[in-house]
Image: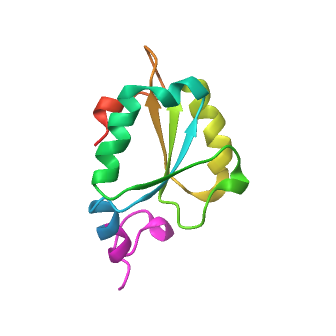
Amino acid sequence: MANFACSMGRNCLNYSKFAEILSGKMKIAVYIGKKETSDSGRLKEMFNRLEAGGCEFYDVKSAEEVVSGTDMMMAIGGDGTFLSSASIVGYSEIPLLGVNVGRLGFLSEHRPEDIA
């Protein structure tokens, strides 16, 4: 299918990719700042909701582990985690979503309860 018009030029998604994202069928790289964070019940609930919507997840710690076809990366932790994960996706044009599991986040402002 042809690309649909938008102001972002080459960064536009083709229609089938856009429909896939809207339907929730996404491949999501997950970067978790602290190991103990991954045991959080809040995160487990968030992942369950997203998986029920058709999302796939895989963990990353380096740019070499980012799989082709990844739709986005979730940085789970705080602002430091968000900055560390930004260096992983760097120039790949993969969108980055910060999920804050602490008290206050300026870069990671979304809570697990706000996602899905």
Asked if residue 56 is among those painted magenta in the image, a careful observer would answer no
Q: Residue 52: give x, y in percent of width and height.
A: 28, 52
Q: Residue 18: give x, y in percent of width and height.
A: 33, 68
Q: Quadrant of the C terminus?
A: top left
Lateral position of residue 84 relative to residue 102, left or right: right
Q: Which residues are magenta?
A: 1-18
Lateral position of residue 64 relative to residue 48, left or right: right
Q: Above or below — where is 77 with respect to 30? A: above
Between 88 and 55, the residue placed more toward the observer is 55
The colouring scheme, among rainbow, by chain, secondary structure or one colour, is rainbow
Q: Residue 108: give x, y in percent of width and height.
A: 47, 29
Q: Above or below — where is 113 with respect to 93? A: above
* Chief SS of the magenta region: loop
Q: Residue 20: give x, y in percent of width and height.
A: 33, 68
Q: Above or below — where is 41 with respect to 48? A: above
Identify the residue at the far top of this view: 103
Q: Residue at x 61, y 62 (%)?
A: 67
Q: Is residue 4 visible?
A: no
Q: Above or below — where is 84 with respect to 57? A: above
Q: Residue at x 39, y 75 (%)?
A: 14
Q: Residue at x 47, y 23 (%)?
A: 106
Q: Residue at x 28, y 61 (%)?
A: 22
Lateral position of residue 66 relative to residue 51, left or right: right
Between 28 and 4, the residue placed more toward the observer is 28
